[in-house]
Image: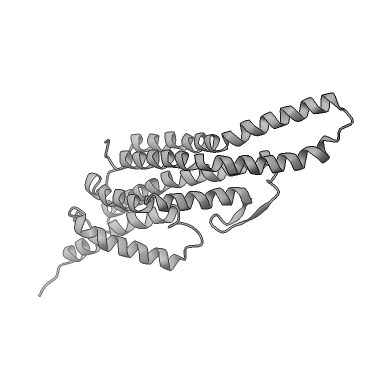
Amino acid sequence: MHISSAEIAAWVGAFLWPLTRVSALLMVAPIFGSRVTPGRVRLMIALALTWAILPFAPPMPIVEPLSPDGLLVTVQQVLIGLSMGFILRLVFSALELGGQVIAMQVGLSFASLADPQNGEQSPLLSQIYTLLGTLIFLALNGHLLLIQLLVDSFTVLPVAPTGADRDWLWILVNWGSQMFAGAILISLPAIASLLLVNLAFGVMVRAAPQLNIFAVGFPIILVLGLLIILYSLPTLLYQLDHMFAEAFRTIGKLAGDNG
């Protein structure tokens, strides 16, 4: 039995390039790319997903993995995986930013803890919003839809030395603005309500200048802010549903599916 080097290279590339795309996506995707997820667990998930995707993937190009063409194919797979995960990660970044804006308006910005997901200090309210967004994402089967889009990407955007182009980068740039727009939509009910509260306190100070606004206003704003957050939480589901739908639609555009 004789096995040539070209056959060995084809076997290695047939598993290496899908694994590269899957691993790049899991590095930045929400939940999978969290710092609390051990690297070994992430590697096992990447290997299992790659093994499950291989029967549905088209034939891989017969290219030497260490050749210039092979390195170019590897870079393309990394860019594809990172881009798909990065789009969905921006939705959770909008949640974090919206929570920070609300915490600043309510007066809870000083209540910050170490965020294990990002490895930095962040307001507690921002972490609560991120946790709620994660639960909603799992309840909507977003992780399963992400895996489905990953499987479909190998059909509409097969492994090749080309893939990411200028239009691809413009889609990513345009999607970056959705993070700020989503943060504003999430924090807008609290901002508008607290603006009316601050205007009421301004009228009170003008009517009674001897009133200590800092001693009276801060507890009232804090209590009203918590009530506003409580009653605005039901709208979070509809906003996240829309943002997740737009994110998956954008990922489909990146993968070449314009429908």
Q: How many marks?
A: 0
Q: Quadrant of the N terminus?
A: bottom left
Q: Is residue 232 above or below residue 15?
A: above
The answer, for residue 66, to whether it is visible in the render is no
Residue 33 shows up from this direction: yes
Residue 207 position by quadrant: top right
Q: At x 74% / y 28%, what residue is drawn?
A: 200
Residue furthest toward the bottom? 1
Q: Where is residue 164 in the image (x, y as percent from the top left)?
A: 32, 42
Residue located 22% across and 48% down the image? 155
Q: Position of residue 66 (x, y in %)?
A: 29, 59
Horizontal placement of 11 versus 124: left or right?
Answer: left
Q: Nearest the camera: 108 or 175?
A: 108
Q: Is residue 71 left or right of residue 96?
A: left
Q: Which of 16 and 7 is in front in this view?
A: 16
Q: 41 or 108, which is in the foreground?
A: 108
Q: Give 220 or 140, whichever is nearer the viewer.
A: 220
Which residue is depicted at the point 42% across and 46% down?
Answer: 88
> Whole-percent x and y of residue 104?
67, 41
